[in-house]
Image (tube, rainbow, N blue to C red):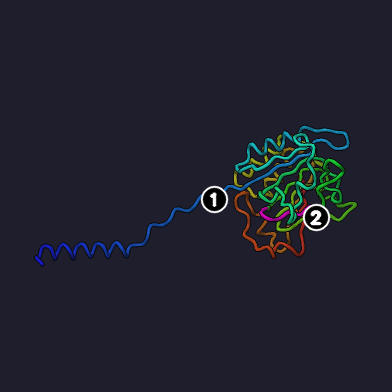
Amino acid sequence: MPAEIDDAYVSLRATTLAQSDAPAPAEKPSPPRRSRVGVGWVSQVLGKQSLRVRQELEAFAATVDAECLFRLGDDLDPAISLEDFVRSEAKPSRVDTVELLVLAGHGGGSNAGLFLPGGKSVKPGAVFFGATLRWVVIDACCTFERDLYDPLQWRRVFDGLHQLLGSSISVSDSVERGRIFAGYLNEGKAVWEAWRRALEETDDAPTRATVMVPAAVASDILGETLHAPAPLARESLGGDFQIIDVAV
């Protein structure tokens, strides 16, 4: 082999070896998946109607930086029922497709929950929140009321759920609450902090912001943001529960 060809081969082989030893280019991280949300409202109970709850949740759905998969409302579909919120092996619920569910309407305390048409309600023992669902907000009066009933009975709705949020006393309707709540979530505020601030800024009178979480992992859960739920094993989401109730 002529010397000049031999030199070229050696040079090419050295370059090829050097390239093969070089570290592979780092893969670009995938953008975080946007969380999915769903909203549901009950505007008429006991002959009284409030369109403000629909306006509140329509504004939330339009503002939040997430994919809104469904909008349930008694004025959109009078046949809205408890089955829309109940999961079973025979009939999966649409709430199993989202991470955040926001409900608004009229509440009857920790024993009665959120009133639905037909005399039913979203309440302990009637619904189970799990699958992909991580946070449920019930914007209604007295969700965690404690004078007559034990609010810890809400532990029965946890089936993979991380947080249940609401209030322990009366709250006023607010068309701005949904937009403000969504705005804080978009800023990256923790879900609990976003709810507390939204309630504080929109209620007509002093009220209380409340959240219920599995006690053993409370510190992990309370810092969760809309697009970053804590990566917790299902078995860690049971046991004792903790209720945090603060004046706002």
Say above or below: 7 vs 63: below
Residue plotted at (80% across, 55% down): 154
Tell me the element at label 1: loop
Tell me the element at label 2: helix
Magenta-tinted stretch = 126-132
Say above or below: 160 vs 71: below
In the rendered structure, the answer to whether residue 127 lies left or right of residue 133 reads right
Crowding at mark 2 (Cα within 10 Å: few <14, some 14-19, many 20+)? many
Q: Real-space Cα distance between discs 1 and 2?
A: 31 Å
Q: Quadrant of the C terminus?
A: top right
Most extreme residue toward the bottom is 1
Say above or below: 35 vs 20: above
The numbered dot on residue 32 is 1
Most extreme residue toward the left is 2
Amino acid at circle 2: Trp
Crowding at mark 1 (Cα within 10 Å: few <14, some 14-19, many 20+)? few
**Residue 166: percent from the left, percent from the top?**
76, 47
Amino acid at circle 1: Pro
Place residue 213 in its image quadrant. Answer: bottom right
**Residue 172: percent from the left, percent from the top?**
80, 38
**Residue 141: percent from the left, percent from the top?**
82, 43
Residue plotted at (44% across, 53% down): 28
79, 47: nearer the viewer? 79
Give the prevailing secondary structure in the magenta stretch.
loop
Magenta stretch contains residue 131: yes
Magenta stretch contains residue 27: no
The numbered dot on residue 154 is 2
Say above or below: 143 vs 205: below
Q: Which badge, 1 or 2, is on the more N-terminal residue?
A: 1
**Residue 205: percent from the left, percent from the top?**
80, 38
